[in-house]
Image (cartoon, rainbow, N blue to C red):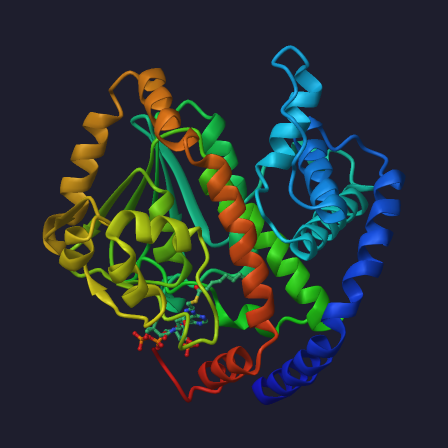
Amino acid sequence: MLSREVSSFLVQQMHMSQTAMRASHKDFETAVNQMKLLKKDPGNEMKLKLYALYKQATEGPCNMPKPGVLDLISKAKWDSWNALGSLPKETARQNYVELVSSLSSSESSSQGKPGADSKQPGYETLVVTSEDGITKIMLNRPTKKNAITTQMYQDIVLALEAAGKDDSTITVLTGNGDYYCSGNDLNNFTDIPPGGIEEQAKNNAILLRNFVGCFIDFPKPLVAAVNGPAVGISVTLLGLFDIVYASDRATFHTPFTHLGQSPEGCSSYTFPKIMGPAKAAEMLIFGKKLTAREACAQGLVTEVFPDSTFQKEVWTRLKAYSKLPPNAMRTSKQLIRNVEREKLHATNSEEISALQGRWRSEECTNAVMNFLSRKVKL
Ligand SMILES: CCCCCC/C=C/C(=O)SCCNC(=O)CCNC(=O)[C@H](O)C(C)(C)COP(=O)(O)OP(=O)(O)OC[C@H]1O[C@@H](n2cnc3c(N)ncnc32)[C@H](O)[C@@H]1OP(=O)(O)O
């Protein structure tokens, strides 16, 4: 079974690398037409994103004079376009196509399902609880070291969206079992849709953009309680948290090069900022694994606790924080993050474009195959 999946994966990878570049222009035109056929209004925020990507894709970086403050609509459009900075035209085209495709597929999947919008999600591999002003989102796949499946990415987005709006003052992400999280579930790469690897890469890019975007925009204090080893995307995302508490058993490992991949979660921006470029390079390029104490010394972790008292000490501390005035906490968090929000979204886009190239590479294919065929463990 495994080898059939792996060989189908390989064949599709080869096909994708041959067709990827030429699909893009045609896809863009199709997406522009598809936009006109959407039945539901995608909302102002989405329309601004699409506008900006369209302009960037067709005209390049924004060099128009900034509209006056009273011309609200033109200013919002200008801000959105300008925020894309020097994003290459091809990347903007690709991002536009993916956004339109996600809008079309969510429209068609909700057709014929009355009340689909109001349905409360039940999470298969997350446990979400709210108590004492704290919403806890716990990754709950301990036998797989809490590796994140595509369904989990979506569920985490839903859980964060709900937590952002609920009555709690603080949101905490943690893991069940001995691991915090072993990163992306590498089996995600073997689940190939009818459109082949090309479609899979697009779907993954959409999923990842939304997922990381949710962390960038999360409105309340966000805390990671890193109960054990953390790998890949679960480490890179830590730069978007407000507090990171770690057990002294935790380790921090970003083996992207070993996997033929490149960093995500905005870490190409946050890590050099947090720990300086030299230390960031050692982690992100060379895959150096840090202990909790090293990660704390480098500023990625706020505080380390002995594993034996980790849960007790962390929750006592968080319960005290959760009683602080919630609006003041939100305001302070937003002041800290808003300064770089646009930069973070642009970084997210660039990292995902790079990853799409990596996912098509032989280096990545081989690394995933080696893990899945049990030849290599990190
Ligand atoms: C939608 C796409 C978005 C992509 C985003 C980009 C994200 C990138 C990343 O996160 S890169 C990092 C990916 N993670 C890894 O490469 C880790 C792979 N896992 C391992 O190397 C090891 O499993 C380990 C070091 C985490 C733990 O080793 P060990 O303690 O010896 O345990 P086991 O290996 O026996 O693991 C138990 C069980 O869990 C399965 N498993 C663990 N991690 C993953 C994983 N990341 N993906 C899939 N499966 C995983 C492992 O296969 C075992 O399963 P089994 O009991 O054999 O069925």
Residue 139 appears in the picture as rendered: no
Q: Is residue 3 left or right of residue 99?
A: left
Residue 36 occupies which quadrant of the picture? Answer: top right
- The residue lying toward the viewer, choosing from 354 and 169, is 354
Residue 137 occupies which quadrant of the picture? Answer: top left
70 up-or-down from 21: above or below:
above
Q: Residue at x 36, y 48 (%)?
A: 270
- Write down which quadrant ligand 1 falls in: bottom left
Name the spot of residue 46 as percent of width and height, x first. 68, 34
Q: Is residue 95 left or right of residue 342?
A: right
Q: Residue at x 81, y 59 (%)?
A: 25
Q: Is residue 41 left or right of residue 9?
A: right
Q: Residue at x 71, y 75 (%)?
A: 16
- The residue lying toward the viewer, choosing from 14 and 148, is 14
Name the spot of residue 113 as percent of width and height, x first. 78, 40
Residue 222 appears in the picture as rendered: yes
- The residue lying toward the viewer, choosing from 212 and 225, is 212
Give the total number of marks visible in the rendering.
0
292 up-or-down from 113: above or below:
below
Q: Residue at x 48, y 70 (%)?
A: 261
Name the spot of residue 246 as percent of width and height, x first. 21, 51
- The residue lying toward the viewer, choosing from 193 and 142, is 193
15 up-or-down from 282: above or below:
below
